[in-house]
Image: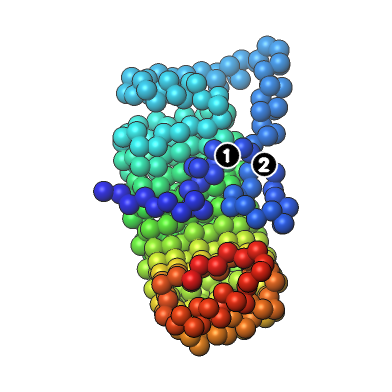
Amino acid sequence: HHHHHHHPHHSPSTMASQRPRRRAAPADHDEQPPQEHEERSEERSAQADRPEESAPQRAKLEEPDMLLAELEALRPDLAATWRKAAMERLFFMGKDIDDATGVILGKLLAKDGTYGGLHLSHNKLGDEACSALTEALKTNTTLLELDMGNNELEDEACTPLAEALKTNKTLKILSLDNNRFGNEAGKALADGLKSNTALIYLTLFKNQLGDEAGKALGEALKSNKTLQWLVLDYNQLGDEAGKALAEALKTNKTLDRLSLDKNALGDEAGMALAAALKSNNVLRTLTLDDNKLGDETGKALAEMLRTNKKLFELRLNNNQLGDEAGTALAEVLKVNMTLSTLRMEDNKFSDKVKETIRQAVKGRRFALLI
């Protein structure tokens, strides 16, 4: 049975269905990646007013029709949605779509440039479908969101995807949650991210990336200039990966949110991340729930919060922070006025220290869970 998790900040499909909006001003802290859907509907109506199309254009239009007929024969339900979905986004979640059908969808996507989003999570796509869908990304210039989460995709599926990311200039949201991607996939994706200039949101929640892939992603973040949200929860990332990501944060100028819950990060990684945030003036949300972070990390984070003026939310639930860390954090919370959400449930604080922390933020707007 698929575990599909429910943190609101991990589900691009729910985000995508909210109203489109421009890039938020920095003061706007809601949890939604920026989207750009407005322009395209105007473009489309302009196309509709155009007089007679030339013969080659007509031929181009007939090809998707043939593919649609093929889809119709296999899956009339999907074909009907495809036809109706001048509604911008195709929602095909949990529709029992197999590899062969996925291949047709990929080919359609390559020929039919009208959709802003394709949501294919909880299906039975395999490597062939993944290949066809990602091949489409090399030519498609309208797709902003692609969700292939929960499809049991293996490493091989990732190589064509990574290649497509090198040249695609439009895809903004890519969700690959809960597949079987390991080191090889992670390294391939990292390679694609190095030169990608469009992707804003990437989620790889619950795969099996491991340290090697984590290190490669850290390297990629040193040169990537567009990614704003990176979700790597539940990926067996250890200290080596944590340190590589920290290294990238020293110079990265765009990442707004980094999520590393449910990994195997210890104090070595925690201290490196804290040190990096002394000089990083961009990251607003760091989530480190369910790791193995102890007092050393807690004290380093407190030290960092003395000077960091950007971090807005820090999550440290279910770690091993004790009173030493708690006391240091309480002290700094009296002077740091930027942080406004701190979650530290299920750690090792005494009641006395918990009370000290509560007092430190008393009387101001602050979300504290402890």
Marking on residue 18: 1
Which residue is at a point 67% across and 78% down the rendered structure image? 334
Residue at the image position 59 percent from the left and 80 percent from the top: 330
Percent from the top left, x then y, of residue 309? 70, 72
Dot 1 lies on which element?
A: loop
On screen, residue 141 versus residue 344, left or right, reads: right
Task: Look at the picture and state if 72 lies above or below 231.
Answer: above
The image quadrant of residue 272 is: bottom right
Q: Nearer the viewer, residue 64 or 354?
A: 354
The location of residue 214, given as percent across then percent down, is 46, 68
What amino acid is at disc 1? Gln
For the question of whether residue 166 can be seen, the reply is no
Local crowd size for mark 1, using a 10 Å CA cut-off: few (<14), some (14–19), many (≥20): few
Density class for disc 2 (Cα within 10 Å; few <14, some 14-19, many ≥20) is few
User: Element at badge 2?
Assistant: loop
Type of amino acid at the residue the image marks with label 2: Arg
Seen in the picture, residue 29 relative to 294 is either above or below; the reply is above
Labelled pair 2, 1 in contact (Cβ < 8 Å): yes
Residue drawn at x 57%, y 39% as measured from the top left: 18
Q: Residue at x 64, y 81 (%)?
A: 332
Residue marked by disc 2 = 21
Does 44 sit above or below residue 96?
Answer: above
Q: Is 226 on the left or on the right of 93, as rendered?
A: right
Q: Is residue 330 visible?
A: yes
